[in-house]
Image (cartoon, rainbow, N blue to C red):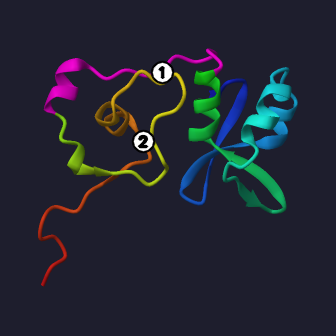
Amino acid sequence: MMVGGVEVHEMHGGRVVRLADIQALPIWGDFEPWIQGQTCLRHAGEPWVYLNDWRRFLRQQGLEDWPRADPAELERFDPETKVCVMNCGPAAGDPRSAAERKLLCDDCEPANPKGAGVV
């Protein structure tokens, strides 16, 4: 799968893109200061960018649309059924509610039902 002109890889249970691939793009000059201070994965001495961060940058630049949930599905969704593990909080320019972000996030994990795991 390609996103924003770079190939997406599965690594250590997450989806990432090679920083070197982004450096080859014309938007590198905008991305370089933006990515400073973000958490990146290092594998075999090479830096990788989490797909969530890459997409957030693309969306903030107007290069990718923010995904939107079906209104009926969003109405039925209980945000308590998912737990955020990749900081899917609001980003600049994101028009979605916290519930809509959580519903659409592929990185959020199912929440334990009340009493699950209790002996």
Indicate the quadrant containing the N terminus: top left, top right, bottom left or bottom right: top right
Q: Which residues are magenta?
A: 61-76
Indicate the quadrant containing the C terminus: top left, top right, bottom left or bottom right: bottom left
Which class describes the residues within 10 Å of circle 1: few (<14), some (14-19), or many (20+)?
Answer: some
For the residue marked with disc 2, what is the amino acid? Asp
Q: Position of residue 42 (x, y in %)?
A: 75, 59
Question: SS class of the residue under badge 2?
Answer: loop
Asked if the stretch drawn in magenta spans residue 71, the answer is yes
Asked if the stretch drawn in magenta spans residue 73, the answer is yes
Which class describes the residues within 10 Å of circle 2: few (<14), some (14-19), or many (20+)?
Answer: few
For the residue marked with disc 1, what is the amino acid? Trp
Q: Position of residue 36 (x, y in %)?
A: 76, 45
Q: Which residue is mark 1?
A: 66
Q: Nearer the viewer, mark 2 or mark 1?
A: 1
Q: Position of residue 8 (x, y in %)?
A: 65, 38
Q: Which residue is mark 2?
A: 106
Give the residue displayed 54% in from the left and 57% down from the top.
Answer: 13
Q: CA distance from mark 2 to mark 1?
A: 14 Å
Residue extending farthest bottom: 119
Give the residue displayed 22% in from the left and 49% down from the top.
Answer: 81
- The answer to which quarter of the image holds residue 44 is bottom right
Q: Is residue 42 above or below residue 37?
A: below
Q: Is residue 31 left or right of residue 107?
A: right
Query: Main structural element of the magenta stretch: helix, strand or loop?
Result: loop
